[in-house]
Image (tube, coloured by chain):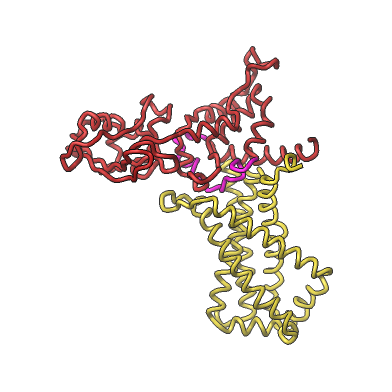
Chain colours: A red, B yellow
Amino acid sequence: MTQEIQFRIKRQDSPDASSYWEEFRMPYAPAHNVVSALMYLREHPVNAQGQKVQPVAWECNCMEEVCGACTMIVNGVPKQACAALIDDLEQPIVLEPLSKFPVMRDLQIDRQKMFDALLKVKAWIEIGGGHDIHRHAPLISPDEQDVRYHFSRCMTCGCCMEACPQFHQESKFIGPAPLAQVRLHNSHPTGVYNKTERLHAIMEEGGLTDCGNAQNCVKVCPKDIPLTTAIGELGRQTTAQWFRDLFSK
Amino acid sequence: MSDSLNVHFLSRKIHSLTGVVPVGAFLAFHLWENSMSRFGGDFFNEHVVRGIEHLLNYKLAIESFLIAVILFHGIYGIVIWWQGKSNTSRYQNGSNVRYLLQRLTAFTTFAFILWHVWSTRVAGGMDPKIGADLFSHMQRIFADPINVALYIVGIAGATYHLANGLWLAAINWGLTTHPRAQKFCLYACAGVFAATTFLGLHALWGFNHRFF
């Protein structure tokens, strides 16, 4: 077993600064993941040349791959750093911030664009109206529950957007994750009340039609969310919606 | 008006639709017609070239419509192309490679169409001698192996763009949603690619037996 863990980290001191690579070495210990290793480096902020440097900045929260905060590119693959086990990774371990979002510092990125997209598509259930909100839980078949459970696991981590050729900082495309949330909430017995609004939101520029079907999203999703299935189903829903708008508005 | 029409959405849908009909349908028909080059010059000039003259009533309207549609599909396609940044070096799954190929073949096809229409339809229209014997004109073009190679690239690019475009259209219109449906559709589209490419190569062979 290797006696040390080697890192090559893409760093950036501030949002406007240019990026640079820095190497780090730390003693090997079993069962490290990338976040726990970064915690060690924070305590010992010394690079491979032995110089004391500013500690590497990164974000994390849940440590169990459900919050998405620690998403970064580990050896070329976008994933959650907390779930990236050192023993499974080829060394030196290369860490980069997600490339499709503004870098705040080092591995920390500004994820606002993703939350804006969730707002845009109304990715929630309205329970404040005078309408029936199904206070007694509505009947949903186990099959449909299973499908919806998968969509509900989305943690807005950004992996799908990182891998998408249509999503980048200059594009208006909202990316696969918010689209899957439209699929999820449109199929909810209460969420369906806002189906038209959600479909209209994704029929604008930057919405569903900006998908290029490269289908990288579904391959990199850490939660196995059937993103491309959602996109196909929304193709059907939006086409029907366009005809409804044309003839009934 | 613009609100209920949703110009952005409509443009994307029309882009998808025009690729299938009339452009895709025309390509299949065009390759089918020209695969009859194997019956020789007399048959080709009489039954294929003259035959189309009679079949295509209102030819000016049909040709203008086709040109307009191809221009729309091509120019709007450039807009779509600009919005993406291909990343096949990092993500090499099949659909991502096809995404890149769809854009590359868009370019080869558009360039090929310009050259092809110029050197056949326009040349035949301007010079009655060429128009009267298009078969010999094509034989002269295919006497040069460079032209044969360019035609193979041009035709295979166009048939790929059509076949993969059908796969994309099936998703865009919500016909195939589940990965399994999309996989079967991919097989079917591969069949379309094989069949149309075969017709195209067969058409070349009919004009020049030397290279096949």
Outermost residue toward the left in this view = A50
* Residue in the picture at 58% in, 61% down: B106
Q: Position of residue A166 (x, y in %)?
A: 52, 47
Outermost residue toward the bottom in this view = B129
Examine the rendering and report whether any part of residue A1 can be seen. Answer: no
Quadrant position of residue A29: top left
Number of marks in picture: 0
| Residue range corresponding to the magenta coloring | A204-225
Quadrant position of residue A136: top right
Q: Nearer the viewer, residue B25 or A133?
A: A133
Q: If the image is split into quadrants, where does the C terminus of chain B sit?
A: bottom right
Q: Nearer the viewer, residue A29 or A93?
A: A93
Residue B92 included in the magenta stretch of the image: no
The overriding secondary structure of the stretch rendered in magenta is loop
Q: If the image is split into quadrants, where does the N terminus of chain B sit?
A: top right
Q: Is residue A124 above or below residue B194?
A: above
Is A64 positioned to the left or the right of A91 in the image?
Answer: right
Q: Position of residue B117 (x, y in %)?
A: 67, 73
Q: Is residue A219 above or below residue B129?
A: above
Examine the rendering and report whether any part of residue A184 can be seen. Answer: yes
* Residue in the picture at 52% in, 30% down: A150
Is A37 positioned to the left or the right of B117 in the image?
Answer: left
Is B187 positioned to the left or the right of B69 in the image?
Answer: left
Q: Nearer the viewer, residue A93 or B203?
A: A93
Residue A205 included in the magenta stretch of the image: yes
Outermost residue toward the front in this view = A16
